[in-house]
Image (cartoon, helix red, strand yellow):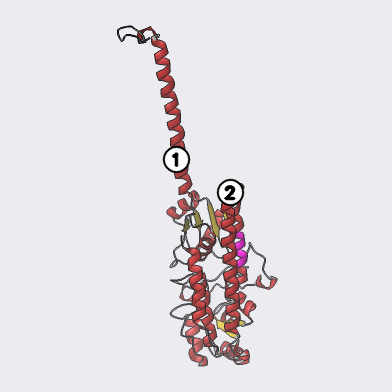
Amino acid sequence: MLIPWSMPFFSTMPCHRKSFFNAAILNNSLLAGAVFLTGINQAAQANSKTIIAVEPLTCDLVSAIALPSTPVTCLIDREQDVHGLKISPRQAQALKNASQVFTLGQEMTPAIRKWLNNPITVVVGVSAIEIDDHHDDHDDHDDHDDHDDHDHGGLDPHIWHDPHNIIKIGNVISKSINNKISFFDRETKKVLKERTQSFNSLLEELDQWTQKQVATIPSDQRTIVSRHKAMEYYGDAFGLKILSLLDVLGHSSSLRPQTISKVLTELREENVKVLFAEQKPPSKLLRNLSRQTSTPIAEQQIFTDGLMPTGNTISVAVHNTCTIVNSLGGSCNKKTGTQLENKWDSLTKR
């Protein structure tokens, strides 16, 4: 039976019951809205939580391993000196907001010391991996000639000049990122594992490529002479002797007659044909020594403290190896080295 519209059907419902339904609907809507907004807010916070890599080299290594969807921010610009860095308020804020911070440690970047106790900070440098004991006696150099200060205070931090050490660094990075991924997110863990394997495989290729290039240097000319002993890991890995001028001269950078004869003796004994500059222009010490001993300086500098102005981790390794090999009478296959650089670029694309 149809109810005539004239009958007071709706008016028979108590007014307070209608209000109750309206209030319930409103409360549920507010609750749903709050949950929705909370979800948005959490998502926004999650997106703002990026990985911070302190040094340019560290940033390149983290970018090669971390998932492409994960934001990775480089704290220090390539043009900045990591040794003399003073962390700005903006950089400090970035460190504070990060989900993880990766650094080579205070041996390379003293300014990061105050952040090392932060639970999100992961040290991946010389104090975090297993290295040979004979690297523990890196000399402290307080010589400031040409703004080239290498007072690392004990452990030599230049471990990445040996590709196998980079693999060890990568494993620390990978393990730390993996610990942040949910146990149930098997797919993400699988992708991370695959990226780490590609990382390690490429560095093994770099190691083999470097061995082949160094093998072309005449056996009696395999000595690298530079101002510091920053290439010692490289020398140990590939069978070259590293001669630090500051080890021979002591802390004085002046070339007095008595020290000149000592240097000349060293250079003759090691059949040294060339000196390697770690900066452009070469340091005053190197220029003076070159002039007084008639030993030329290599046309290209070697990069000992991280990345070059352009390129990646493989780029600097290939550049240094070709500079060393060609200068010492060998023959470097730059083309195959460039192919490795390109493979690395494909890992770091984000």
Q: Give the camera-side residue of 186 and 306.
A: 186
Q: Give the camera-side residue of 205 and 248.
A: 205
Q: Is residue 310 above or below residue 88?
A: below
Magenta span: helix, strand or loop, mainly?
helix
Give residue 41's mark: 1
Q: Earlier in the sequence, mark 1 or mark 2?
A: 1
In the rendered view, does 300 fall on the left or right side of 155?
left
| SS label for mark 2 | loop
Residue in the picture at 42% in, 12% down: 17
> In x, y percent, where is residue 291?
48, 90
The kind of residue on which mark 2 rests is Asp
Q: Does 170 appear in magenta? A: yes
Q: Give the camera-side residue of 333 and 220.
A: 333
Looking at the rendering, which quadrant does residue 261 occupy? bottom right
Q: Which residue is mark 2?
A: 185
Q: Are marks 1 and 2 in contact (CB under 8 Å)?
A: no
Q: Is residue 244 above or below residue 24?
A: below
What range is drawn magenta here?
166-172
Q: Does 328 appear in magenta? A: no
Give the crowd class for mark 1: few <14, some 14-19, many >=20 residues within 10 Å: few
The kind of residue on which mark 1 rests is Asn
In the rendered view, does 140 fall on the left or right side of 301?
right
| SS label for mark 1 | helix
